[in-house]
Image (cartoon, helix red, strand yellow):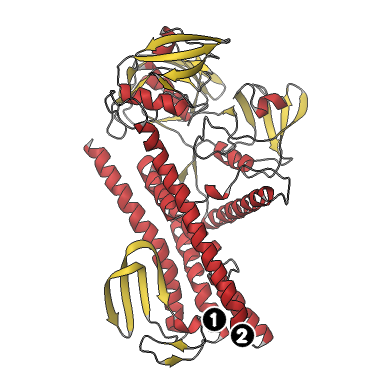
C-alpha cells in the first residue's frame, strides 16, 4: 500500500512537472527570440492569474496559480491594436515582419528541440511495445455477429495487408491504422492456399471502449510470446532460456502478455506445465510454481470468471462455470439491478468482495437465475520479461507524431463533414476524442502510474511535438497565424487591415474557447462516468479495490 501511494505521488509529480515544462519550453523560445530581436517584453509568465512575480531588468517574471498554460507579453507583435504601448503607456513601434516571424516560430521550434532531446533518451533506453513488430497477423478469435465476422473473417486467417498496403507494426499500431481509416476497411487475407479480400464498415466496440466509442477490432491476433527469465526467478530455476517462445500453458494456447497474466491469475498459484518452442525444438517444462507478487500494493482481485456480455467464454473452475453459466448467455440483471454492459458487472464484483451475487441470465429466449460467489485470486509471476522493445531514433518519433496529428485532424474533419452531410465517408473518430489539459494530464499520470518512466517520457515527446505542430497551423491566434500575417506583410508591403483582422481574430478566439470547453467537458465526463457507475451499484456491499475485473484480455484490455 505504501508503494502504491508513493507511486501515485510520483506519477502526479511527473504529470505536473512535465506538463508545465512543455509549456515553459514553448514560451522560453518566444522569450529568447524576442530578447535576441530587441523587442520590448512586459512579462514572462508560467500559468495564469499570477500569485508570484518579480521584475528583473525590466521584465516581470510571473507564476500563475492556474497551471494550464503560459505566455510572454509582447505588445509589439499584436497585429490588431491601433497603438502599441508598454506597461507604462508609452507608445512602442510595431515589430518588423521578420522579427515577428522569428519570435512566433521560436516557440514551436523549441518544442521540437525539446522533443528531440527527450527522444534521444528513449532511443538509447528503448521503448516497451505491446507486441513484437508484425508483418502478418494470424487471427486467433473473431467475435460472432461482428462486422468482421459478417464480412467473412475467421479464426486462422492470416492478414498480410490492410487497405491494400503491407504493414510492419505492433498490434496497437495495426489497431490505429484501422481507427484512422476513412470509409470501409479492407483486409487482405490468406486462408489455406486462397487469397481473399474482406471488406467491412468498422463499428464501435463497446466491450473494449464503452466510454470512448471507437471502432476497435472485434477480432484478436495470435501474437508470438518470447520469454526472457530474470535471474533467480521461477522461470530461470525451471529451465526456461532467453528467447524461448511460449506455445502452451497447461495445454492452452496463450496469445498475448495480457492473456498470460490472466491465465496466471486464473490458476491462482497452482503448478503449471509450459510448452515452449526453442528454435525448432519443442520443450516441455513441468510443475513450474509461480511466485506471488503485489500489483500496485494489492495481492490479487475478485473474479467470477467470464468474458463479455453476452458471454463469449466461461473460465473453467471459476464461479460462473460452477453456477452453470454458458457461452452465449446474456446477463440482464445483477444484484437486482439492470445490466447495461460488462462494466456494470465488474463494478458489482469489485464491491461484493466474496459476498454472493444473484445474476439473471437470458438463454435461448428463456430467463434463469444463478448465484455466484466471487473468488479471490492471487497475483503471481513467472519472473520473465518480454523483449518487445524498440529503439526509434528521435526523427522517427517526430515522423510518427506528424502522421498521428495529420490522421487525427483528417478523421475529425471527415467526421464533421459527415455530420454536415458534406461527405458520406465513414469514421468513428470524433471531436470528442480530442483531449484538453485535463485529458492530457490524465494520460501523463497513467503513463507513469501504469507504465514506467520511459513510457511517460514518450508521452511527453508526443505532447511537446504536438504542441509545436498545432501552433504552426496558419490560424490568426496561433503562432502560425502570426507567421502568415508577417509573411503577407512582406509580400504585399503593407499590413493586413485591422478592420479585417480584428473580427477574424475575435471569431477564432471564441472558437478556441468553445473548443476548450467542449474537450474539457468530455475529459471530465471520462473521469466522472466510472465513478457515477460505481455509485449506482448496491450501497449495502462493502467498498472494494479499484482494479479491472472479470474481463479476459482477448476482448477487454
In the drawing, does residue 83 fall left or right of residue 140?
left
Q: Which mark identifies residue 495? A: 2
Depth check: 65 or 456 in front?
65
Tags 2 and 1 touching, CB below 8 Å: yes
Depth check: 286 or 262 in front?
262
- Vertical placement of residue 489 versus 105, above or below: below
Task: Please tell me which residue is depicted at 46% across the width and 45% down the height of the picture.
Answer: 127
The image position of residue 72, as x and y in percent, is 41, 75
Mark 1 neighbour density, 10 Å: few (under 14) some (14–19) many (20 or more): many
- Vertical placement of residue 481 versus 190, above or below: below
- Vertical placement of residue 57 versus 134, above or below: below
Task: Please tell me which residue is depicted at 28% across the width and 81% down the height of the picture.
Answer: 55
In the drawing, does residue 297 fall left or right of residue 242?
left
Depth check: 186 or 499 in front?
499
Q: The N terminus is located in which quarter?
A: top left
The tally of labels here is 2
Q: Which residue is disc 1 drawn over?
A: 79
Q: Which mark identifies residue 186? A: none
Task: Tell me which numbered mark, 2 or 1, is placed earlier along the sequence.
Answer: 1
Amino acid at each position: 500500500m505504501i508503494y502504491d501511494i508513493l507511486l501515485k505521488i510520483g506519477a502526479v509529480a511527473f504529470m505536473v512537472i512535465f506538463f508545465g515544462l512543455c509549456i515553459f519550453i514553448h514560451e522560453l523560445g518566444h522569450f529568447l527570440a524576442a530578447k535576441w530581436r530587441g523587442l520590448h517584453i512586459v512579462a514572462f509568465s508560467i500559468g495564469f492569474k499570477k500569485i508570484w512575480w518579480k521584475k528583473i531588468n525590466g521584465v516581470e517574471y510571473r507564476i500563475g496559480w492556474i497551471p494550464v498554460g503560459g505566455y510572454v507579453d509582447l505588445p509589439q507583435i499584436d497585429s490588431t491594436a491601433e497603438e502599441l504601448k508598454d506597461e507604462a503607456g508609452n507608445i512602442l513601434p510595431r515589430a518588423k515582419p521578420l522579427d515577428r516571424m522569428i519570435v512566433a516560430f521560436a516557440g514551436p521550434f523549441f518544442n521540437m528541440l525539446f522533443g528531440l532531446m527527450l527522444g534521444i533518451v528513449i532511443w538509447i533506453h528503448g521503448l516497451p511495445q505491446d507486441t513484437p513488430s508484425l508483418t502478418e497477423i494470424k487471427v486467433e478469435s473473431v467475435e460472432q455477429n461482428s462486422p468482421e465476422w459478417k464480412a467473412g473473417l475467421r479464426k486462422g486467417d492470416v492478414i498480410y495487408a490492410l487497405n491494400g498496403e503491407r504493414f510492419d507494426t505492433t498490434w496497437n499500431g495495426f489497431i490505429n491504422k484501422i481507427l484512422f481509416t476513412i470509409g470501409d476497411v479492407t483486409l487482405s487475407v490468406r486462408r489455406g492456399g486462397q487469397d481473399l479480400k474482406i471488406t467491412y464498415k468498422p463499428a464501435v466496440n463497446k466491450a473494449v471502449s464503452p466510454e470512448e466509442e471507437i471502432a476497435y477490432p472485434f477480432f484478436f491476433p495470435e501474437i508470438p510470446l518470447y520469454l526472457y527469465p530474470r535471474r533467480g526467478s521461477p522461470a530461470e530455476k525451471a529451465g526456461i532460456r532467453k528467447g524461448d517462445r511460449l506455445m502452451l500453458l497447461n495445454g492452452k494456447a496463450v496469445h498475448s502478455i495480457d492473456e498470460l497474466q490472466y491465465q496466471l491469475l486464473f490458476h491462482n498459484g497452482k503448478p503449471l506445465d509450459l510448452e515452449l518452442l526453442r528454435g525448432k525444438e519443442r520443450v516441455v517444462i513441468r510443475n513450474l510454481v509461480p511466485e506471488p507478487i503485489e500489483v500496485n500494493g494489492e495481492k490479487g482481485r475478485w473474479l467470477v470468471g467470464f468474458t463479455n456480455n453476452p458471454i463469449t467464454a466461461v473460465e473453467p473452475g471459476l464461479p460462473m462455470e460452477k453456477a452453470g453459466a454458458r457461452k452465449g448467455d446474456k446477463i440482464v440483471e445483477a444484484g437486482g439491478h439492470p445490466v447495461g454492459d460488462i462494466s456494470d458487472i465488474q463494478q458489482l464484483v469489485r464491491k461484493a468482495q466474496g459476498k454472493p451475487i444473484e445474476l439473471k441470465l437470458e438463454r435461448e429466449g428463456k430467463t434463469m437465475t444463478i448465484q455466484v460467489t466471487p473468488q479471490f485470486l492471487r497475483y503471481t509471476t513467472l519472473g520473465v520479461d518480454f523483449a518487445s522493445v524498440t529503439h526509434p531514433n528521435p526523427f522517427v518519433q517526430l515522423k510518427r507524431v506528424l502522421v498521428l496529428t495529420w490522421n487525427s485532424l483528417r478523421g475529425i474533419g471527415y467526421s464533421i463533414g459527415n455530420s454536415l452531410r458534406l461527405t458520406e465517408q465513414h469514421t468513428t473518430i470524433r471531436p470528442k476524442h480530442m483531449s484538453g489539459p485535463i485529458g492530457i494530464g490524465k494520460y501523463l499520470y497513467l503513463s507513469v502510474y501504469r507504465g514506467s518512466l520511459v513510457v511517460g517520457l514518450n508521452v511527453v515527446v508526443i505532447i511537446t511535438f504536438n504542441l509545436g505542430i498545432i501552433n504552426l497551423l496558419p490560424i490568426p491566434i496561433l503562432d502560425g497565424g502570426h507567421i502568415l500575417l508577417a509573411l503577407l506583410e512582406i509580400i504585399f508591403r503593407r499590413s493586413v487591415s485591422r478592420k479585417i483582422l480584428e473580427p477574424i481574430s475575435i471569431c477564432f478566439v471564441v472558437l478556441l474557447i468553445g473548443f476548450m470547453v467542449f474537450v474539457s467537458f468530455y475529459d471530465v465526463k471520462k473521469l466522472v462516468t466510472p465513478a457515477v457507475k460505481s455509485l449506482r451499484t448496491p450501497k449495502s456491499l462493502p467498498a472494494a479495490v479499484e482494479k479491472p475485473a472479470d474481463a479476459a484480455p482477448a476482448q477487454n484490455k
